[in-house]
Image (cartoon, rainbow, N blue to C red):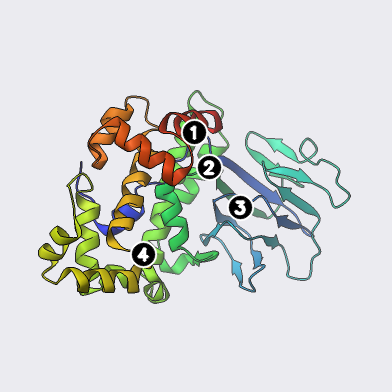
Amino acid sequence: MKEIDEFSGLLEGPRARGAFTLRGLLASPWSLRIEADSPLTVIAMVKGEIHIAHDNGETVWLGPGDVAIARAPGHYTVADHPDTEPTIFIYPGQDCRAPDGRSLHDEMMLGVRTWGNDPDASTLMLVGAYESMGNVSDRLRNALPPLLWVKNEKWESPLIQLLSDEMARDAPGQAAVLDRLLDMLLIAILRTWFDRKESKDLPWYQAKGDRIVGRALKMMHQDPAHPWTLAGLSAKVGVSRAALARRFHEVVGEPPMAFLTQWRLALAADLLCEPDETVGTVAERVGYSSPYALSSAFKRVRGVSPQEHRSNALASG
C-alpha cells in the first residue's frame, strides 16, 4: 500500500467514471434550478458572470476563472441575476425541464457536450457532475460545506480552458479524458480551498492538526493494512489507551477502531471497482485476514456484499 498522508487520503477517492460534463452557453434572462442531487458538482467559469444562491442562504457571484463546488444533499439556483425566476429545472439524471414540466433536452442541445439557449451567448460555464461516488469520496464530501468557491485571483490553473476545449471535441476515448481532467480540476480547486483560513475551522482540519489525533490518523491513513489495535496506536502516539480513545472521539466523533474500519472499507469499496482486483487481493491490501473477513465486515457496515458493490458500481459507471 502506497504512503498516503491525511490530505492525500481525503482526496484519494475522486476518480470519475462516466461523469456528466457539459458546456453551458446562456444568454439573459436565464435561471437554472438545480435539484439533480449529484454527490459533487464542479462549476467553472470561462466567460461572463453567474450568481449562485444555495438553499442554505449562501450566495456568490462567479466571473471568468472563478470556480465553485456544490455537494449533495442540497439544492441551489444558478442564474444571470438573483431576481431572475427559474426558467429551467435540472432533476436527478440531469433531466432538464421547463417550469411546466416539458423536456428541454433536444431544443437546448447546441453541439458536442454543449447546451444552452444561444450559441453566441456571452456567458460560458463548465459543469462537471460526479453522479456516483464510493465511500472514500463520501468522506471527502462530508468534509466539505454545501457550497464552496475559489476566485480567479486566488489560484491559477490552465485546467478550465483545457477542460472547455476537450468538452467540445468528439474523439475516441473522450469520456475517459474528460473524467481525468475533471478529477484534476476538482483536486486543484480543493488544494487551494483547503489552504484558506475558513477551511481550518472544519472538523477534518482540526483533527489533522491535533497533536494526538493527527498522529493516529496519519498512521492509519498511511498503513491501513497494519493490524492496528487501540493499545498499539496509543503506544505509537505516546499516550494511554484511555487518553487516545477520549481525545479521538472528541475530535473525530467516533472511536479510533470504528474510524479504522470505515477507512478500510472505504478503500475497499474503491479498490473493488478496479478490474484487476479480487476480493482476496483487496482484503490483503486493506488489512483483512481473508476474503471472508472482508465480505462479512463489508456486508455488515455497507449492507451489500463486495460482489454486489462491484456489480452496482459497474452498472452505474
Say what secondary structure mark 3 lies in: strand
Towards the viewer: 192 or 230: 230
Give the residue at mark 3. Answer: 125
Q: Position of residue 235 (x, y in %)?
A: 10, 64
Q: Where, by quadrant of the figure, is residue 94 drawn?
A: top right
Give the residue at mark 2. Answer: 132
Q: Is residue 278 above or below residue 268?
A: above
Give the residue at mark 1. Answer: 313
Q: Is residue 259 above or below residue 315?
A: below
N-terminal-most mark, 2 or 4: 2
Residue 129: give its label. Answer: none
Q: Nearer the viewer, mark 1 or mark 4?
A: 4
Q: Amino acid at mark 1?
A: Ala
N-terminal-most mark, 1 or 4: 4
N-terminal-most mark, 3 or 2: 3
Towards the viewer: 31 or 138: 138
Horizontal side, residue 297 vs residue 311: left or right: left
Q: Residue at x 28, y 67 (%)?
A: 208
N-terminal-most mark, 1 or 2: 2
- Mark 1 vs 2: CB contact within 8 A: yes
The quarter of the rendered structure image containing the N terminus is: top left
Spot the residue most to the right: 100
Q: Is residue 229 above or below residue 14?
A: below
Residue 254: give its label. Answer: 4
